[in-house]
Image (cartoon, helix red, strand yellow):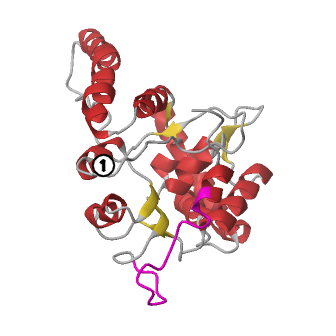
Amino acid sequence: MEGKWTIDTMASMMKDAAYDLNGDGKMKMQDDRFAAIWGHTFGNEMYLAAGLHAVQSDSSGNWTINIDDADSVDFILKCADLFSDKSKMLVFTGTNADHYKVFTEGRLLFIDSTVANTIFYVRGMEQDFGILPIPVLNEGDPYLTECNTWLPSGIAVPITATDTERLGLIMETMAVYSYDYLLPAVAEKTLGKVSHTNTDYQILTMTFNNASFELNTIMDFGGSSQLLRSACFGAVKNFASSYEKIHDAAQKALDDFLAAAEESD
């Protein structure tokens, strides 16, 4: 990819992408063309890709939720300005099949998709399509892709397990084999049959290599993660005052989580 794929570039491409195809004066998902359809967590994904972190530690080692600092607020306001026009873009409601139909029918410029849904819903698309990472905020930023944390992505070990050393060795070995063999196979064999350009494989490899987790997106301390994602799409008009109302509850939820983690050690 030549040059960095930024939020401003994406917003520029979406500017004139929506169109009332049937001329009835109403933008309907089943009839018209839209600039984008975003998943509910796309605001969180953009926040992470911008190099911002909701949970941070200070010089004393104290952990706090930091989504109301100057950089975060500036980013949220920027996103709300660019992505709040509901006549041009939509947020996922209803079924996945409904939204992917808009894309496969060629009436959508961008769709926020997981790798799995790309395989399930876009496989039979006749038109060419491309795969892009989550856009960065600035040209010099590295690409970061937030992992989907709502699917079985971990291993549960029962408390009755006795040979923990052997168990740990098996788990580590499976992780290594997964990274060395399974990941390339998914990108090259499975997704390679779906994506329509050679560049897509390179982007997918880069995406997998820069996969990241954001703790507040997973835990949603005090509802702060949901507030952030809503504010990024302009659904919350005064983010600062809205966050102030839940700040104490969010921080307490984080403190309780950290205390529980220390006890489990």
Q: Which residue is mark 1?
A: 117
Q: What span is colored magenta in the figure?
A: 13-28
Disc 1 secondary structure class: helix
- Res. 185 image quadrant: top left
Q: Residue furthest bottom?
A: 24
Q: Going 68% across and 45% down the picture, which residue do you hit? A: 137
Q: Is residue 242 left or right of residue 256?
A: right
Q: Going 47% across and 80% down the picture, which residue do you hit? A: 20
- Res. 2 image quadrant: top right
- Res. 138 image quadrant: top right
Q: Going 33% across and 76% down the picture, which residue do you hit? A: 30
Would you place residue 253 above or below residue 35 in this image?
Answer: above
Q: Work out whether residue 32 can be spotted.
A: yes
> Label 1 is placed on what type of residue?
Asn
Q: Position of residue 41 (x, y in %)?
A: 48, 55
Q: Is residue 126 left or right of residue 241?
A: left
Q: Position of residue 21 (x, y in %)?
A: 43, 78
Q: Is residue 25 or residue 114 the one in the foreground?
A: 25
